[in-house]
Image: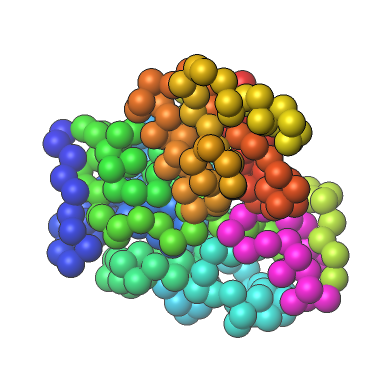
Amino acid sequence: MKTKILPASSHKEAIYELEKGGVVAIPTETVYGLAARFDEPEAIKKIFLTKQRPSDNPLILHISSLSMLPQITETPPSMFYTLADAFFPGPLTIILRKSPKVPSIVTAGQNSVAVRMPSHPIAREIIEAVGVPLAAPSANLSGRPSPTLAKDVLEDLEGKIPYIVDGGPCEHGIESTVLDLTQEIPALLRPGAISRRELEEFLGLSFTSHSPAFSPGTKYKHYSPNAKVLLCSDAMEWQTISSSDHKRFLLDREGKGLFFNEKNLYALFRQADREGYKEIYIYCSEEVLSNEALMNRIEKASHK
Ligand code: TXA
Ligand code: MG
């Protein structure tokens, strides 16, 4: 199969492909997603096969309007609407009780379902046009860094999918925050583009870390470049590392390294691999250490 990159201005073929049960990569404001309609188990199976994703890791359903909710969830708690009012559309994923209409392959057999309304105009247009929620994990091969550019998707999935809709670089560059609302006290299952603090302050409560619906995805090796990721949080040691004569792939905030943040971390990981580096050195300053979502991705990448 030849993979075609479609410009954002003409993605009709992608919509047609989705309507008939195919799988295509679409841009979102966080990372690119590998989308299929939620109500076709065969299409969902293709997502798992294409990504080589373990079948016990459930998918997020993407909606373009709250009117799609009854197709996929039971009646949500009022806190859902409070959050949706403030953070939808945007990089927040909420776990709710699932409707029986959602095939069990989508939720990996769980009785909950993950829901998100992306803010990317192309993603919204595509969901709207297909007319049903779209399941979409990040459009990388399982274990690889999430794609933040159309060419990153091509790097992992060339020849495996017919279309990649090119929406340009993703605004956030890391995945959505995943919040479980299936129990009385919400639980943060994955830190992400919206910070824990912002959500807790908005709701006026503290999240629990205990959740029966723990995110199966969090147990897998994730976000990893082929290069080994080495962390340093000692300024003196970083001096030594970064002034070595060896040519090194260095990431920091204000030194000799390449500047990094949430937005470009995955792209830098991919760059290091393309350039053949065996190691990536990252300086974790206080500022970086205090960024929960960024540290979560860096630490996962560093565990081989
Ligand atoms: O920003 C994002 O969320 C991107 C874009 C494409 O929307 N998607 C994304 O999907 O990151 P994925 O599949 O790479 O990560 C989804 C995470 C996984 O950790 C998965 O285990 C968790 O959400 N998840 C999905 N459904 C769940 C459920 N019912 N209960 C608990 N965790 C769930
Ligand atoms: Mg992913």
Q: How many marks?
A: 0
Q: Which span is picked out in magenta?
A: 184-204
Q: What colouring method underlies this structural image?
A: rainbow
Q: Residue at x 45, y 77 (%)?
A: 65
- Asked if residue 97 shows in the view, the reply is no
Q: Residue at x 73, y 56 (%)?
A: 188
Q: Name the one closer to the observer, 34 or 46.
A: 34
The quarter of the picture where residue 183 lies is: bottom right
Q: Name the one closer to the observer, 184 or 74.
A: 184
Q: Residue at x 62, y 55 (%)?
A: 192
Q: Name the one closer to the observer, 276 or 214.
A: 276
Q: Is 159 on the left or on the right of 30, as rendered?
A: left
Quarter of the image for the C terminus: give it.
Answer: top right
Q: Residue at x 77, y 57 (%)?
A: 187
Please state the horizontal and vertical placement of residue 174, each as a whole percent of the image. Answer: 52, 51
Please state the horizontal and vertical placement of residue 134, each as a whole percent of the image. Answer: 40, 59
Quarter of the image for the N terminus: give it.
Answer: top left
Image height check: is 15 above or below 42? Answer: below
